[in-house]
Amino acid sequence: MRWFWFATFTLICSLLSVFFRQPLILIGEILIVDLFITRKIKWLFWFPQSVHRVPGWLNMILWLAITVWVIRVLAIDSLTIETTANKPALQPGDNILVSKVHFGPRLPFTSYRLSGFTSIKRGDLLAFNFPEGDSIVADAGPVSYYALKRRSLSDNDTLFNPAVTFQKINNRVPEVSRCVGLPGDTIFIHSADEGKRYRYAIQQYDYLVEMNGQLLPDYFVKMLGLTGSEVQFISGLGCLLPLQPGQVIQVRQRPEVTALAPYFMDSAKGDYNIFPHDVRYPWNRDNFGLVIVPRKGDSIRLTLLNLCIYQRIIEAYENNRLEERQGQIFINGSQADTYTFKQDYFFVLGDNRHHSRDSRHWGFLPKDHIIGKPLFIWFSATKRAGEHFRIYWNRILNIL
């Protein structure tokens, strides 16, 4: 009979791991083997004698919960990718294992981080808690409170006053992007040469595809790895497709295509949705900077012109009270014309350059928001509307 229960609990453990997208649940297999087969470990050694009558299965669940919690906090965790921001390296439905020991785990309920065994390098994928996720608006979906606020300002919406819930760092939405700027680096993005300089991974850009009146066949769009929501039609021009360098040749050779060109924004056209969200810095997604990534211990001269670049760091990330009065800057009540950074910051970009929420939109990534280093894809599956549940076997165990 014990073999029956062993097989049953093993199956349940495996199904729970897939259902909750959490591979650490598979640690329970070790407990199941000992509970039903080997019976070598006295799992109740740490309980008082009076509670040694706790059923074995309940004790197993308790041990599994504690073990998984400790490992998730100090060693490794699993994240599910829900956006196309890092295609082709990561796609929606990918479940990745994230190492916290590479850069050092954050201790729960504190701001302290243990030392890791390696440092962050340019080109590393980083898992982090979304910096603008400190304020949550109900039913807003993935759009942050600050993005909604900027939109209301540009639309002159004086009635914008949603109910906001504050989130601690560990509770903010986890995201993944690629590090392209280390503390002290100077960042400059220009549409004319960004693709030539960026060599950390395969990147995607939007291309404007002009056609002869016929649409690209559905099978070809699927072959490119695109869904219908990723194809944007522009009346009178054609459509926008996010393409990798190798796919550009394939699309250009299609008989329906008459012209194909990268769809970059004009450097003279600023975008208020792009950091630092100030008309004095008319930057956009394709033309950004110059800006220096803050480094712990470095001091900068504060002016009314550059204050918008460092304001969120000073106020939100380093917990100071910042004021501007009569053309002067005050920090914690004292006049200030310089500021010294208390921690390191990083600049991150998504590989799917025109469909990524990254440092171009919300600014610098604080070190205390970093969760860890993505290692590999342990499971990949999606369930889209009108389609069956599909497992992508060719993506499982891909090293990142």
Image (cartoon, rainbow, N blue to C red):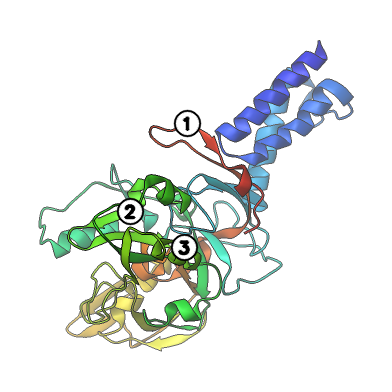
Separation of marks 1 and 2 at Cα, in angstroms: 22 Å
- The residue where tag 2 is placed is 231
* Label 1 Cα crowd, 10 Å radius (few <14 / some 14-19 / many 20+): few
Instruction: Please identify, in this view, whether the residue under mark 2 or under mark 3 is nearer the observer.
Output: 3
Does dot 3 land on a helix, a strand or a loop?
A: helix
- The residue where tag 1 is placed is 388
Q: Report the amino acid beneath label 3.
A: Gln
Cβ–Cβ under 8 Å for marks 2 and 3 = no
Question: In the image, residue 33 lies at what x, y percent?
Answer: 81, 27
Does dot 1 land on a helix, a strand or a loop?
A: loop
Residue 195 seen from this side: yes
For residue 247, the mark is 3
Among numbered discs 1 and 2, the one appearing first in the sequence: 2
Q: Nearer the viewer, residue 385 or 376?
A: 385
Q: Nearer the viewer, residue 208 or 185?
A: 208
Among numbered discs 2 and 3, the one appearing first in the sequence: 2
Question: In the image, residue 39 lies at what x, y percent?
Answer: 87, 24
Q: Nearer the viewer, residue 357 or 351?
A: 351
Separation of marks 1 and 3 at Cα, in angstroms: 27 Å
- In the image, 362: left or right of 128? left
Split into 4 quadrants, where in the image is the N terminus? top right
Q: Report the amino acid beneath label 1.
A: His
Split into 4 quadrants, where in the image is the C terminus? bottom right
Q: Quarter-wise, where is residue 261 in the image? A: bottom left
Question: In the image, residue 123 lies at what x, y percent?
Answer: 57, 71
Instruction: Please identify, in this view, whether the residue under mark 1 or under mark 3 is nearer the observer.
Output: 3
